Image: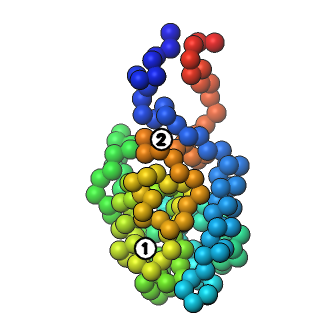
């Protein structure tokens, strides 16, 4: 017997993203960024991916915009394996090259998703003049990013292709 819709767990309100969809959406992000040149009509100097989720979209954006300088910033915000989805204290584990970054002028900071915005707020404090872009954005985090492609509701859990494996799933309603 199927559970009532009101009894479903929050992660069951999921948005499943395939590799193909992520690639299309990251290319769309690059196309949108192409018309958002840095101040003074310059070119993007570098792309900084927020690890780990921003690495794939950042690579695609860098390829599409022919940006050769790519770096990463690693910010840990989720606690332990058993507490997935629970945000804790933010901690920068690895910073991009300081000489390249400066205050962020001409640098694209790319992530897969902005949820609450806490991670991007921390990175913005470090690099206030960088341009922040994500593939997906939830309402709480939207004010933090300048460019994004798809809005999803705050209570939607996004399942990225690197988080999934093929397996049988029961039908949404019914047993057959």
Observer-nearest of 53 and 105: 105
Residue 103 spot, x, y in % from top left: 42, 84
Q: Is residue 59 visible?
A: no
Near-viewer residue (175 or 94) = 175
Q: Residues within 10 Å of mark 2 (few under 14, many from 20)?
A: some
Sooner in the amino-acid sequence: mark 1 or mark 2:
1
Rendered residue at 39%/54% (across/down)? 140
Q: Residue furthest top?
A: 1
Q: Residue at x 61, y 37 (%)?
A: 165
Residue 147 disc label: none
> In the drawing, does residue 73 fall left or right of residue 78?
right
**Which of the labelled discs sits on residue 156, or is there none?**
2
Q: Which residue is mark 1?
A: 95
Check if mark 1's residue and mark 2's residue have beta carbons within 8 Å. no
Q: Is residue 71 above or below residue 160?
A: below
Residue 127 location (% of width, % of height): 41, 78
- Point out residue 42 in the picture as x, y percentages from the top left corner: 61, 87
In the rendered view, how is the structure colored? rainbow
Q: In this picture, is 56 found above or below 73?
A: above
Residue drawn 63% across and 12% down?
176
Q: Badge 1 local density, few (<14 within 10 Å), some, or many (20+)?
A: some
Q: Mark yes or no: residue 122 visible.
A: yes
Q: Position of residue 146 (x, y in %)?
A: 50, 68
Residue at horizontal 59%, vertical 57%? 149
Disc 1 on helix, strand or loop? loop
Nearer the observer, disc 1 or disc 2?
2
Occupied quadrant, residue 28: bottom right
What distance separates the C-alpha of mark 1 from that of mark 2?
30 Å
Q: Farthest residue toward the left?
A: 89
Q: Is residue 59 left or right of residue 147?
A: right
| Residue 136, image quadrant | bottom right
Numbered disc 2: secondary structure: loop
């Amino acid at each position: 017997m199927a559970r009532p819709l009101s009894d479903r767990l929050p992660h069951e309100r999921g948005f499943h993203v395939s590799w193909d969809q992520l690639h299309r959406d990251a290319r769309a992000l690059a196309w949108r960024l192409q018309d958002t040149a840095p101040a003074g009509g310059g070119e993007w100097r570098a792309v900084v991916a927020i690890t780990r989720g921003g690495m794939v979209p950042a690579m695609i954006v860098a390829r599409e915009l022919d940006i050769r300088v790519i770096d990463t910033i690693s910010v840990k915000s989720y606690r332990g394996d058993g507490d997935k989805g629970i945000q804790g204290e933010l901690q920068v584990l690895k910073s991009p090259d300081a000489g390249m970054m400066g205050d962020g002028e001409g640098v694209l900071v790319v992530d897969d998703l902005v949820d609450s915005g806490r991670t991007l707020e921390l990175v913005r404090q470090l690099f206030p003049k960088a341009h922040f872009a994500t593939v997906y954005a939830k309402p709480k985090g939207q004010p933090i990013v300048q460019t994004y492609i798809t809005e999803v509701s705050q209570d939607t859990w996004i399942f990225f292709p690197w988080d999934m494996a093929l397996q049988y799933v029961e039908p949404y309603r019914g047993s057959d």
